[in-house]
Image (tube, grey):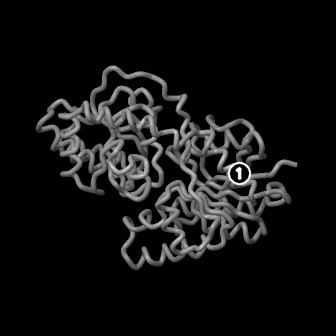
Amino acid sequence: MKKNILLIMPNVEKGGIEKNLILLTSYLVKNFKIILVCSEISNDIKKELDKKVEIIIAKNHVKSNFFSHRIRNTINAFLEVLIDKKKIINEKTILFSLQNHPFPILLSKILKKKIIIRIANHPSSSLRYFNNYPNYLLKIFIKIFFYRFANGIICNSNSSRIYLKKYLKRNSIITIFNPIKLNDYSKKSDYRKGLLTIGRLENQKNISGIILAIEKVKKTFPSIVLKIIGSGSEKNMLETLVNNKNLQENVQFKGYINPKDDLYSSKILILNSYFEGMPNVLLEGLASKIPIISTNCQSGPDEILENNKYGSLIKVNDVDELSKKILEIMQNYELAKLKAEEGYKSLYRFDFNKQLEKIEEYICSF
């Protein structure tokens, strides 16, 4: 009997973690039975998943608005597994959590099954920016408390692993980078223009900061255009900001589309996040040889760009520095292109097969 991996991911939306889900399941489904439990799943992602992956969509067991939408989805996924455990769980089942880990960890203890959790964002910075200090302390305590009971922890950056090892003295905390298929990025680009940002239109990505920087850049380059690829709850707010700053001719909202053509045709890729894990967009940027500007947020950009070696790192939430860096690269573009070329050569670190082999070996060790 194949080992049965129960993947718990309550909110399957459109973003970097979903790209990792697609790559992970396409690789593991060859040797494992994969069951994905979620409460919501994007139709686009559903179509891209391997047909051998069994998808269980949780019913609305809890409908109360007392909980946030995402937490409610997590509770419903938790209850769905408990209610249908005889159909879902067997003696060879191992749980693998990709989101909101306390509930899946609790579920593993109730079911008496081992669990591996994958940390997508830096454990501390993902809380620090959106909570006052008392709330931050409470939430980080709860997070670390529950992590103690996970059998295995996969971090996608060394920074996250080092942070967790300060509080959890465990050898089972390891780093496995996000995988990228370099064969998917073989196109040559002879002509580039404009700026590009890719990501969910949510507070974490700080797209508004890029728009404010464009207002400053426009004074030197009046026809500059920023393309925004992604969808999310902040779209209306961002469109209003664009209108208020009279940037309608300078900012394009392209929605959730495949970004490859834009990665090859744009001049600079910008990531302006408050926090990240190991952002796929930067890996895709290096694979496309596009010059990159990224905030030096915890935890992945510095590890990908190796302290400005393969791109430009700026302070978090600094509109002035971002606008100055855009102008600097526009005026010294050949140097930025050389950095991007060197960054492309460094991507062997994130090789698809190498990283997914590590995950498979790690699962088999439990």
Give whichever of 144, 224 is nearer the camera: 144
Q: Secondary structure at mark 1?
A: helix
- Rendered position, 296 above or below 147: above
Which of the two residues, 297 or 14, is positioned nearer the viewer here? 297
Q: Taking 229 as reference, is 200 above or below it?
A: below
Residue 331 is situated, as x and y percent measured from the top left of the image, at 18, 34
Name the residue: 33% across, 37% down. Answer: 339
Please name the amino acid that badge 1 sits on. Answer: Glu
Residue lying at 74% horizontally and 60% vertically, measured from the top left: 81
Left or right of 89, for residue 328? left
Residue 256 lies in what quarter of the image?
top left
**Residue that protrudes farthest toward the right in the picture:** 1
Image spot of residue 348 (x, y percent): 52, 39
Query: For this rendering, which residue is in front, 152 or 272?
Result: 152
x, y percentage for residue 82? Answer: 75, 64
Q: Which quadrant of the figure contains the C terminus?
A: bottom right
Q: How many residues crowd around disc 1 within 10 Å: few (fewer than 14), some, or many (20 or more)?
A: few
Percent position of residue 138, x then y: 47, 78
Picture quarter containing residue 85?
A: bottom right
At horizontal 60% and vertical 70% (from top left) the residue drawn is 147
Label 1: which residue? 361
